[in-house]
Image (tube, rainbow, N blue to C red):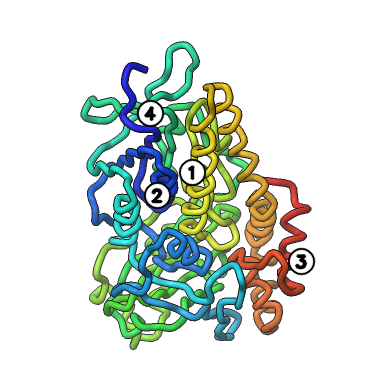
């Protein structure tokens, strides 16, 4: 390469890209963060953050006590004719509270935190593909829509489910991994102020119970984020009008909640949820995948933000070690460890999640679980830990069971 514009180029300033950039800059590297949109910008999401995600924000020094962050105590579960509240577990590894913050400015806050720590952010830059070395086939930079090129020693793809960079390097989705879809909108509603994230475990399409859940997350600004997430493990997936399903579900809610067309503050929007490492390998020829680009979404609950930031931190640590290598061969050996590190961290747990979503794709299994599991508080507390991946390494019996199952399950 004749010129290098940065030690590392990170494409995409969502939670994964901003976290990767933050940790690399914190380690003293020159990082160029490229974002195709301009902040603030919309992003389809439930806006709910579990303690796992909160931990990452705290680790990066984001001020979650500032105005606009809404705390919650846990999860309210509705289903099988029951309604009960589960507090977030008391753990050493994670805080005991969750948060709500709309993606309208959440990503901007995390990106601004990265900039404050030395990252160079360029907004309105659409990356169209990789720049490849003619001899090795390694990525040495990126091309943009306006004809510019930026070059670096390592490139990170944090450009989401439709990642152009990964596709440009020949990395396609694995069809043996679950995929979800989420649709949501906002309503002016008295439900805007709630101490709990609320999930509804019964989504019906006529007489068919669908694998997924609905949610009502109070945003605290007079509106509530209302949406639903569905999995592709049911026979009905692909044949459902998800926006219409959300409208019908909202019409079944109590009238005093105000989930009506007149109170809707924006359109119904949808997005795909790539789960369980549905794009691999997570490193190839100078390109590192983080967050949704590598399918790092929890198949148990559809949570992506926590894993976006966590994979960003892991990637940054390995890239930092690689960049101090004395030779290109040493750098390459270090970068090639990244996929196995991810598999060791999440592989077994994601495999359990794949088995779970395959099971609940069968209506009878979903109906049985809702009817017989919900009435048992102890079982539901265990389920909260399992589905949220919220355990201590040396905790109580439920922690040990979940951790042991994750270790013995084949890696995703």
Residue that appears at 53% across and 72% down: 95
* Residue, disc 3: 401
Q: Is residue 386 left or right of residue 206?
A: right
Image mark for residue 316: 1
Disc 4 crowd rating (10 Å Cα; few below 14, some 14-19, many 20+) is: many
Q: Answer few, some or many: residues within 10 Å of disc 3's Cα (few below 14, many 20 plus, some between 14 and 19).
A: some
- Give the Cα distance between marks 2 and 3: 34 Å
Q: Are marks 3 and 1 in contact (CB under 8 Å)?
A: no
In this rendering, the label closer to the viewer, 2 or 3: 2
Q: Name the mark nearer the viewer: 4 or 3.
A: 4
Q: Verify CB contact (< 8 Å) between mark 2 and mark 4.
A: no
Question: Would you identify the image quadrant in which residue 369 lies?
Answer: bottom right
What percent of the width, then of the height, locates residue 259? 33, 77
Label whose residue precedes the other's in the sequence (1 or 4): 4
Residue 148 on image: x %, y %: 24, 26
- The residue at the point 35 percent across, 83 percent down is 193
Q: Nearer the viewer, residue 407 or 44?
A: 407
- Residue 122 falls left or right of residue 141: left
Would you place residue 128 above or below residue 244 in this image?
above
Q: Secondary structure at mark 4?
A: strand
Pointer 4: what residue? 152
State the image coordinates of residue 248 (x, y, percent, origin top left).
40, 71
| Placement of 221 over or under 406, stated as above or below | below
- N-terminal of the pair, mark 2 or mark 3, is 2
Q: Which mark is residue 22?
A: 2
Q: Quadrant of the N terminus?
A: top left
Alpha carbon distance from label 3 to label 1: 31 Å
Closer to the N terminus: mark 1 or mark 2? 2
Mark 2 or mark 4, earlier in chain: 2
Q: What is the count of numbered marks?
A: 4
> In the rendered structure, are the residues bearing label 1 and label 2 in contact, judged by CB atoms less than 8 Å apart?
yes
User: Which quadrant would residue 35 be assigned to in this image?
Assistant: top left
């Amino acid at each position: 390469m004749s010129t290098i514009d940065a030690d590392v180029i990170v494409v995409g300033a969502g939670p994964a890209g901003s976290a990767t950039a933050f940790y690399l800059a914190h380690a003293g590297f020159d990082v160029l963060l490229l974002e195709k949109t301009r902040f603030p910008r919309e992003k389809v999401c439930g806006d709910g953050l579990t303690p796992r995600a909160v931990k990452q924000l705290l680790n990066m020094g984001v001020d979650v006590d500032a105005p606009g962050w809404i705390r919650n105590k846990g999860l309210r579960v509705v289903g099988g004719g029951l309604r009960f509240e589960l507090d977030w577990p008391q753990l050493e590894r994670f805080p005991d509270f969750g948060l709500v913050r709309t993606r309208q400015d959440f990503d901007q806050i995390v990106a601004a935190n990265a900039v404050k720590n030395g990252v160079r952010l360029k907004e309105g830059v659409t990356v169209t593909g990789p720049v490849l070395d003619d001899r090795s086939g390694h990525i040495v930079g990126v091309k943009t829509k306006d004809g510019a090129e930026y070059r670096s020693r390592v490139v990170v793809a944090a450009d989401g489910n439709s990642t152009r960079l990964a596709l440009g390097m020949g990395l396609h989705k694995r069809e043996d991994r679950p995929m979800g879809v989420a649709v949501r909108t906002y309503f002016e509603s008295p439900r805007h102020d709630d101490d709990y994230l609320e999930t509804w475990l019964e989504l019906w399409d006529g007489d068919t119970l669908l694998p997924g859940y609905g949610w009502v997350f109070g945003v605290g600004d007079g509106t509530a984020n209302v949406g639903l997430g569905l999995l592709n493990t049911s026979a009905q997936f692909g044949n459902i009008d998800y926006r219409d399903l959300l409208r019908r579900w909202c019409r079944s809610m109590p009238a005093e909640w105000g989930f009506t067309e007149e109170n809707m503050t924006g359109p119904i929007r949808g997005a795909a949820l790539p789960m369980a490492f549905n794009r691999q390998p997570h490193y190839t020829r100078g390109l590192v995948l983080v967050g949704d680009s590598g399918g790092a979404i929890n198949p148990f609950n559809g949570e992506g933000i926590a894993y976006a930031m966590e994979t960003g931190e892991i990637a940054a640590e390995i890239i930092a070690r690689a960049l101090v290598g004395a030779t290109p061969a040493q750098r390459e050996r270090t970068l090639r460890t990244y996929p196995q590190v991810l598999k060791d961290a999440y592989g077994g747990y994601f495999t359990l999640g794949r088995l779970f979503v395959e099971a609940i794709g069968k209506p009878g299994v979903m109906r049985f679980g809702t009817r017989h599991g919900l009435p048992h508080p102890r079982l539901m507390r265990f389920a909260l830990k399992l589905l949220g991946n919220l355990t201590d390494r040396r905790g109580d019996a439920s922690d040990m069971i979940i951790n042991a199952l994750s270790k013995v399950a084949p890696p995703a």
